[in-house]
Image (cartoon, rainbow, N blue to C red):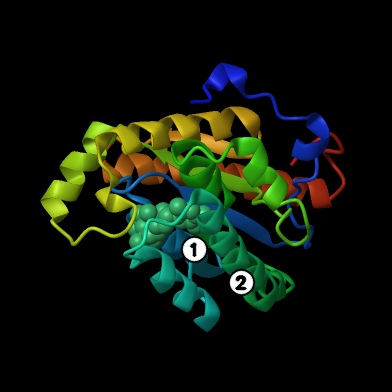
């Protein structure tokens, strides 16, 4: 298996990935393994942004278009063991369609924040690392526009594989395709996400998802507010060196 140390991704590949440029609008994503608290934090952030008079649009991956929902079912209810290349191609198709059908149109309306529940880093952690397709390979598959668009900020809620299993037990919901893969798979997912964070340190913010809900919400808001105010200042021409 490839380990952290053996991963070296060419700079020209990493540099293909850029955040969309729409004045006054932002693209965010939440990432993390099952039980990390994404859905709760996402709902709280949406609410907080609306109080700040932003249009906050929540999209989930895979899904959020009728085509995407069909793909979601095809993957997550699959009885066949799909190979990781098949998986990532399906996720990337859903992603590409959602970007052109919804995301880019919404971002074109000023004062909008589009918040994704999972995005490219799920493909890096799940297919690239845990399913062993390779991080570089997943990035290469995303090498064409609009798949080269990445969020301005990704909030990675980090919990351990053990915490994930405990929280899943409490929920006691039926397990889908990935959720039935077991402890070792979850440990690899955490490693995969940690690796993604080291590749995109400016974009991905690793937050301690083991903290209580209010503390995590505080941390999330802290980073989002920083982004919104930095960008505001940038568009006023005051911080030419800000690097998004
Ligand atoms: P979902 O029910 O949305 O999971 P969660 O509630 O934990 O977010 O199911 C999405 C599943 O698909 C989840 O197990 C992660 C997986 N996935 C990938 O493997 N690759 C991807 O690119 C995406 C977007 C999701």
Q: Which residue is mark 2?
A: 98
Query: Disc 1 beta carbon < 8 A from ligand 1?
Result: yes
Question: In whole angstroms, how far apart are the C-alphas of marks 1 and 2?
Answer: 9 Å
Where residue 69 sits in the image (x, y, percent)?
46, 76
Where residue 239 sits in the image (x, y, percent)?
82, 38
- Point out the tag, 1 or 2, that comes first from the N-terminus: 1
Where residue 130 sits in the image (x, y, percent)?
44, 38
Secondary structure beneath dot 1 equals: loop
Query: Disc 2 beta carbon < 8 A from ligand 1?
Result: no
> Residue farthest to the top?
5
Horizontally, residue 28 falls left or right of residue 234, namely: left
Where residue 10 sits in the image (x, y, percent)?
77, 30
Circles 1 and 2, Cβ within 8 Å, touching? The answer is yes
Q: Residue at x 36, y 41 (%)?
A: 216
Along the viewing direction, whichever of 99 and 214 lies nearer the viewer: 99
Rendered image quadrant of residue 14: top right
Horizontally, residue 12 falls left or right of residue 26, namely: right
Secondary structure beneath dot 2 equals: helix
Give neighbour class at mark 1: few <14, some 14-19, many 20+ (Cα, 10 Å).
Answer: many
Can residue 187 be spotted in the picture?
Answer: yes
Q: Which mark is residue 61?
A: 1
Can residue 159 be spotted in the picture?
Answer: no
């Amino acid at each position: 298996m490839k380990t952290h140390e053996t991963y070296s991704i060419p700079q020209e590949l990493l540099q293909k990935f850029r955040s969309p440029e729409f004045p006054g609008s932002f693209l965010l994503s939440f990432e993390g393994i099952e039980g990390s608290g994404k859905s709760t934090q996402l709902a709280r952030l949406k609410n907080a942004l609306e109080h700040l008079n932003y249009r906050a649009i929540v999209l989930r991956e895979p899904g959020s278009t009728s085509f995407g929902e069909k793909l979601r079912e095809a993957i997550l209810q699959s009885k066949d063991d799909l190979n990781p290349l098949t998986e990532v191609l399906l996720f990337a198709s859903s992603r590409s369609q959602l970007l052109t059908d919804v995301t880019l149109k919404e971002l074109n309306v000023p004062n909008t924040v589009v918040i994704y529940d999972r995005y490219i880093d799920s493909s890096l952690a799940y297919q690239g690392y845990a399913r062993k397709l390779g991080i570089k390979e997943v990035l290469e598959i995303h090498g064409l526009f609009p798949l080269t668009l990445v969020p301005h900020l990704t909030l990675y809620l980090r919990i351990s594989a053990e915490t994930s299993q405990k929280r899943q037990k409490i929920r006691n919901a039926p397990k889908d395709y990935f959720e039935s893969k077991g402890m070792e798979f979850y440990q690899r997912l955490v490693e995969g996400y940690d690796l993604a964070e080291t590749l995109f340190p400016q974009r991905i913010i690793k937050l301690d998802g083991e903290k209580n809900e209010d503390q995590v919400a505080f941390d999330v808001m802290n980073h989002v507010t920083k982004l919104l105010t930095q960008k505001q200042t940038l568009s006023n021409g005051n911080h030419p060196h800000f690097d998004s």
